[in-house]
Each structure stands twice: as C-alpha cells, then as structure tokens.
Image (cartoon, helix red, strand yellow):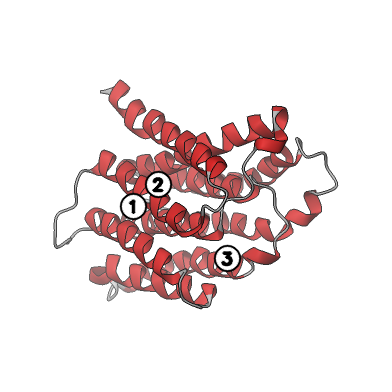
Amino acid sequence: MFSEIILNTVVIPFVLGIVLFFAARKFPEFGLWGAFVTGIAVFCIYILLEGWPSLPPISSKPKVAVLIAGFTILNVASGFLRINRFALILGLLSLALLWIGWNRIGDIEMLPRFAALMVPVAIGGWAFQNFDQQDQSSLFWPITLIAFAIGGALIALLGAYIGLAQAMGAVGAFLGGFALLTFIFILFRPNTAPTNLPQNVHQVIFLSLMSLLIAIGLYAPEVSTIAIATMAMVLLLPGLTARFARFPTALQPVIYGITTAMPVGVAIAIAAL
C-alpha cells in the first residue's frame, strides 16, 4: 500500500516532469500544444490518484477532474484569442469556486473560506497578466508553483483532507522532475537547458492547482483560511525576479527557492497552530 502511494504520488509524476523537460528542450516552440500536453499529464496524475470521475459530477473530487480537463482545453483555446489574462483567470476560477461550493453558498459560516480562496485567485490573475514583464529564468515560475503545491498539500494534510493533499503533492512532484533536470543542465550544460516554459503551460498548472485548492478550502474539515490567504503571497514573487539577476546564474534558483519558502512556511506554521 505504501509503495503504491509513493509510486502514484511521487515517482510517476516526477518521471512525467522529466518527460516535460525533454519535450521543452526538444521543441523550443512549446506554446499551445505544450500547454495541452501538460494539462493532460496533470489530469492523468489526478485520475491515477482519485480514479475516473463520475459523470455528471456531483461531489467536489470529480468536479476537480472535470475542471482540470476543461481548464486545459479553455486555456489552449484562449491562446488563439486576445483575452485579458487577469479577466480570464478571475472569471474561470470564480466560476469554479461557485460550482464546487454551490451547496455551501448559503452557509454564512463558509464566507471566510470563500473570501480566503479569492486571494490566490486575484493574485494569480495579476501575476499572469504581468507575465511578459517579469525578468525570469527557466526556473522561477516552476519553483513558485512547486512552493504553492507543497504549501497547499501541507495545508490540506493539516486540515484533515489527505486525498487532495496527495494530489497537490503529486503536481508538485511533476514540476519537481522538470525543475531538477533543468537545474542540472543549468549547472553543467547551460547552453542546452530549455528556456522559460511558455505562459500557457504555467497557467494550466496554476489553474489545476487552484481547482484542487478550492476543493480543499471548501471541504477540508479543519482548514485554516488565514493559511490559504498567506500562502497566496508566494504568487507575488515572480514579479520581483529582476532583483535576483545580480546573483550568479547557478545561485539564482537556489536563492529564489529559499525566498518562496518564506511565505509558504509562514502559512504552514499558521495552519499547524
């Protein structure tokens, strides 16, 4: 049982992340089809852990699977259209929040949870709206999303929602496979390391993680709403990446990783209290 959990939560997602690395390295123009392949990989990771969703979906877990697939398709389709990224993310995730939490909207005690979840929605929309202005290496956004996934997994675990904690951790392992191999190439073969993954790829991963976090935030029995809002601060850091340019190239991901650990660490500490 334990070996199966490790295989499905860590090993297989990590290997898929390595495949993502070689795909990005082989095909520099990784744009829309890369986002589609990435979304399918995340969907398969989720299905591996939670099983095929019942249709039509009623509970939160199958709704998350449908959202991951739907967001992948819509994200690729939006690449052919001139759509404001902030409006796109805010609109899609607001609808996801309403759909997953439909049966809890009338409960006044749920208002803090809905409010807390709107924080990463708004900050994430702002971050992707300003994506092109961010001075970043190939690892800044993957590290940001890894930190976000790990933080969400631990908040879910501390909130007594083990199933989706595994799913968040698995997406983090998926990005970890990509990030580790990218870092190795930066150290030893910098001229052959892939450049930054396109915005669409990062965006589909963020939307998938937010689908999971919405379900965690609304249905984890003991979730900390303050921890969720605090963890969202990590999404502000890609906008500050120009400040890391003064460090040697090999040190930039390390220092940035330590920086992302700060808001996530604070959030986890709050959730543990």
Camera-near label (3 vs 2) is 3
Sequence-wise, the earlier of marks 1 and 3 is 3
Residue ID for mark 2: 156
CA distance separating discs 3 and 2: 25 Å
Residue ID for mark 3: 128
x, y percent for residue 52: 19, 47
Do residues under tags 2 and 1 come within 8 Å of each other at their CB atoms? yes
CA distance separating discs 1 and 3: 28 Å
Q: How many marks?
A: 3
Q: Looking at this view, is 229 or 15 the one in front? A: 15
Q: Viewed as shown, does residue 67 lie left or right of 139?
A: left
Q: Is residue 217 visible?
A: yes
Residue ID for mark 1: 220
Residue at 42% across, 76% down: 91
- SS class of the residue under badge 2? helix
How busy is the neighbourhood of tag 3: few (under 14 within 10 Å), some, or many (20 plus)?
A: many
Q: Amino acid at mark 2?
A: Ala
Residue at 46% across, 59% down: 32
